[in-house]
Every structure is written in C-alpha cells, then in structure tokens.
Amino acid sequence: MTASQGTGLDIVPFVDLTAQYPAIQGEVDAALRDVFERCDFILGRAVEAFEGAFARFIGVEHAVGVSNGLDALCLSLRGLSIGAGDEVILPANTYIATALAVSAVGARPVLVDCDPSTFEMDVAGIEAAINRRTRAIIPVHLAGQAADMRSVMDVAQRHEVVVIEDAAQAHGTQYEGVPVGGLGAVGCFSFYPGKNLGAYGDGGMITTHDAVLAARLRQLRNYGQQVKYEHVEKGVNARLDSMQAAILNVKLRHLPAWNQAREQHAQAYLDLLDGVGDIRFQSPVANSTHVYHLFMIVSDHRDALQAHLTAAGIQTGIHYPIPIHLQSAYQDLGYGPGDFPHTEYLARRMLSLPMFPELQEHQIKRVTTAIETFFI
Ligand SMILES: *Cc1c(COP(=O)(O)O)cnc(C)c1O
C-alpha cells in the first residue's frame, strides 16, 4: 500500500525538513534554552563549542564560524589577499555562489567545464586556464562527492596557486580517507537549512590548518578587530550566530548517521533504476566517498520526466538550470553558449530526485515506479 492510495495524493517532497525536528527536539530546545539563559548571542560559548567540534570532525586545527557559505568563500579569498587584478579558477558546473564570491572581492572568475561522467571540475581545463594572474583554484565537491583532488592539488602546487575548497555540499565526504575541507588551504562550508548539515537559518564555516590565516579570518568576520574598537583592517560583520551554532552543534552529532541514511537511499535508487529508460547516473570519483547532498539522474527526456513526476506528486530539483556563464549577471565575462559544452549538456538533462535522511522506502519506491511508468 503506497501513500498515494486513498483520498488525496501525498507529496513526496524533494527535501522534508519537518521530518527531522521531532527526532531531535529535546536536544535542540535544551541547547537553545542554554543560549537564552546566557544571552551570549554574538560569538558566544555555543559558537566556540561548535567551532571546536566542527574542526575535530573535519580533522583541522581551526574552524571559523561565519554567516553563510557565500561569506565563507568571500572571507577566505580576502584572508588570502586575493582581489582586484587576480584570477580565480572555478567550475562552470556549480551554484552561482562560488563565482559571486570571486566577483565580490574584485577578482575575475575563470570558468572551466566539468567532466561529463563525474560532473566534477575537469582538471585538464584548469591547466589550460592557468596564467600568471591566477591566484587560486576553487574545486567544488559537487552533490556530495569530492572533486578529483589529487589532480587539483598537483596542478595547484606546480603553478604555486592556493586551493580553496567549496565544500558546501560535502559535509563529511572523505577523499583518500581525509575529510574534504582539510585538503586545500581552506575549506568553505554552508549550513543553509537544506544542506547535509543545516542550521535553522543561515550559517557557514571556514576550516584550515593555518593558525595565522585563522586569526585573520576571525578578525575579518568581526569588523577587522581583535580588540574591541581597534580596527586593524576593513572587516565585515559576517559572524556565525550563537543560536545557529547551538543547533548545529546538536545536529553535528547526528550527521554521520544522516549521511549513512542518504547513502542507503542512493543505493536503493541505483538498484531500482538500473536499466530503466535512458537514465544515467553520476559516476564515482576515485578515492572519494559520497554523502549524497543531491541524487542526480541524467535523461534526454528530462523536462517531460520532471513534468510526469510533478503530476505524480513527486518533487524534484534541477542543479542547475542555467550555467553561470549563461546567467545575465555574468554577461560581462564574455562567455557564450557552447563555451562549456558538458556543463550545458547537463543543465538540459540533469534532474535531482528527492533526497533527505528521513526519506522512506515507500517514498523511494513511488519515485522509481513513477520513473519506470514514464519510460513504458
Ligand atoms: C549552498 C552553496 C553555497 C552557498 O552557501 P550559502 O550558505 O547559501 O551562502 C556555495 N557553494 C555551493 C556549491 C553551494 O551549494
């Protein structure tokens, strides 16, 4: 018996945040009450505790809590003194935030295409895009799988540029046994509510092994001051909120189990959709785990398939429908259609299926059955 049988059609949501709170309500409410009683709302004890716990989770010395994932990237670039006149290489196949951070500090985003099978940044493209103005590479661990980090680190070392990991979709992903966010000069995380580790609002984190850089980042996020009212540089207000930190500290304890649940759901999708229609999947990256922030499928009939699923009460997502180089906001970069063919190919064909830890077996069955029906 499926949930759709009965009077109304039950929706299979793309992400269901309401399914999670009841399971952790006691812990979350208690953690918030502690903050309310202390009233240390700005850079309070909860921020310090969560920074310590997150640093241990990623296996780095330092974690700096910031306001969101975009600010994590912006502050990292500023902390590494990257700005006007500099170029930063990043994948065309990513969320626009990766590029916006580079623009925000006055540097130029230089895009490279993706690998058509893993959907991750194509390393041959990096090599071709590097020149004497290049200061950094931002690999994105897309959908929860690591970029080809051995090759990225190798190119970066040979050309003496830094690596800033965009790990906003990869909390807990391991590459060669090392958590991502601990491989480059810095790792940037987002705690947007729908991410694998999500706040009840906005939040972000920068991870690093470098004590000097960590100190500068702490200063930059807090008005450029170490001592109150002594401003050594022109910083910003980009602090992680104490209440979000308290919630995130509770949720971090559950993250490994949640990531494991996502992996099981992905395995179920892969088994049930094997050989169905023209569907293809994201290929594994060698030596990377996958925490399935997104479960993506590729089909030449994507738009009709999505409409079919919507009619069947199944919510899906497209990540991302318009590549960065074709966005109106980025016409100034001078790119055009055809410049990044693999990214453009995916933008027309990829579809993200419902994925969250609390997803039920019967919901997965409804999704896969509906896809099978479409291809009959
Ligand atoms: C979500 C996301 C960001 C931005 O995070 P926010 O917290 O929403 O600012 C950056 N990069 C990638 C790849 C993301 O998925």
Image (cartoon, grey):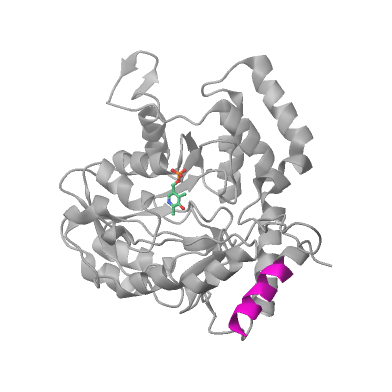
In the image, residue 208 above or below residue 145: above
Residue, far front? 7
Left or right of 148 on screen, residue 192: right
Q: Position of residue 246 (x, y in %)?
A: 63, 31
In the image, residue 375 above or below residue 93: below
Can residue 285 be spotted in the picture?
Answer: no
Q: Is 202 a magenta residue? A: no
Residue, far right? 1
Residue drawn at x 72%, y 57% as measured from the top left:
10
Can residue 158 be spotted in the picture?
Answer: yes
Q: How many marks?
A: 0
Q: What main secondary structure does the magenta stretch of the protein show?
A: helix
Give the extent of the magenta segment.
Answer: 364-376
Residue 23 occupies which quadrant of the picture? top right
Q: Position of residue 375 (x, y in %)?
A: 59, 83
Residue drawn at x 16%, y 55% as measured from the top left:
133
Left or right of 317 on screen, residue 17: right
Q: Is 368 a magenta residue? A: yes
User: Of 261 and 167, which appears nearest the observer?
Assistant: 261
In the image, residue 182 above or below residue 337: above
Left or right of 334 on screen, residue 297: right
The quadrant the C terminus occupies is: bottom right
In the image, residue 41 above or below residue 152: above
Residue drawn at x 63%, y 62% as measured from the top left:
314
Q: Position of residue 18 (x, y in %)?
A: 69, 44
Q: Position of residue 111 (x, y in %)?
A: 27, 62
